[in-house]
Image (tube, grey):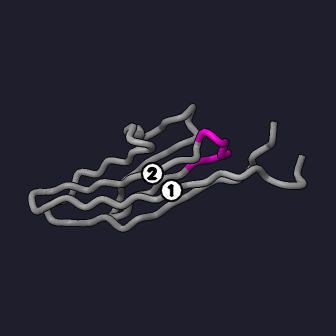
């Protein structure tokens, strides 16, 4: 099996008044604050959503969607993540 060393960090601006409720999903399933054995962390601080995946594996590939909702509307942004094996490091 290939070895994976990289991590993924995504910072997305997300602010509003009133403060939006933010959810992050991977392939339609909500991610929790600390998911995937502690390798995945999600936080929403000071108008920024941070999604971090440490020691990526093929299971981390997929579509990640951030949704922000407040009294004035809903905004959604999705990105597709592809995980490739590290080459020459085994």
**What residue do we see at 20% from left, 55% from top?**
69
Image location of residue 89, percent across then percent down: 88, 51
Q: Is residue 82 left or right of residue 11?
A: right
Q: Are there few (<14), some (14-19), or many (20+) residues within 10 Å of tag 1?
A: few
Picture residue at 30% right of the left edge, 59% below the top:
76
In the image, farthest residue toward the left: 71
Q: Position of residue 57 (x, y in %)?
A: 67, 42
Q: Nearer the viewer, residue 36 or 76?
A: 76
Inspect the magenta stretch and tell me whether residue 55 lies in it.
yes
Give the mark, 2 or 1, whose residue is nearer the N terminus.
2
Q: Which residues are magenta?
A: 53-59
Between 35 and 73, the one nearer to me in the picture:
73
In the image, residue 21 sits, relative to residue 30, either above or below, namely: below
Residue at 60% of width from left, 39% of height from top?
Answer: 59
Of 39 and 61, which appears nearest the observer? 61
Within 10 Å of disc 2 (Cα), the crowding (few <14, some 14-19, many 20+) is many
Quarter location, residue 72: bottom left
- Mark 2 — residue? 64
Q: Residue furthest top?
A: 37
Element on which disc 1 rests? strand
Query: Along the horizontal axis of the image, is 32 left or right of 15?
Result: right
Kindly report the distance in space between the C-alpha atoms of the residues bearing marks 2 and 1. 6 Å
Mark 1 = which residue?
80
Report the side of 47 relative to 51 (left or right).
Answer: left
Q: Residue at x 37, y 48 (%)?
A: 24
Q: Position of residue 43 (x, y in %)?
A: 40, 51
Residue sitting nearer the eye, 44 or 10: 10
Quadrant in which the N terminus appears: top right
Marks 2 and 1 in Cβ contact (< 8 Å): yes
Disc 2 element: strand
Residue 90 at what x, y percent from top left?
A: 90, 46
């Amino acid at each position: 099996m290939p070895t994976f060393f990289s991590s993924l960090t995504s910072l997305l601006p997300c602010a509003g008044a009133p403060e939006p409720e933010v959810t992050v999903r991977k392939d339609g399933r909500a991610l929790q604050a600390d998911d995937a054995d502690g390798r995945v962390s999600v936080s929403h601080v000071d108008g920024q959503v941070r999604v971090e995946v440490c020691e990526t594996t093929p299971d981390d590939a997929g579509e990640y969607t951030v949704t922000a909702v407040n009294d004035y509307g809903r905004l959604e942004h999705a990105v597709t993540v592809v995980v490739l094996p590290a080459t020459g490091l085994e």
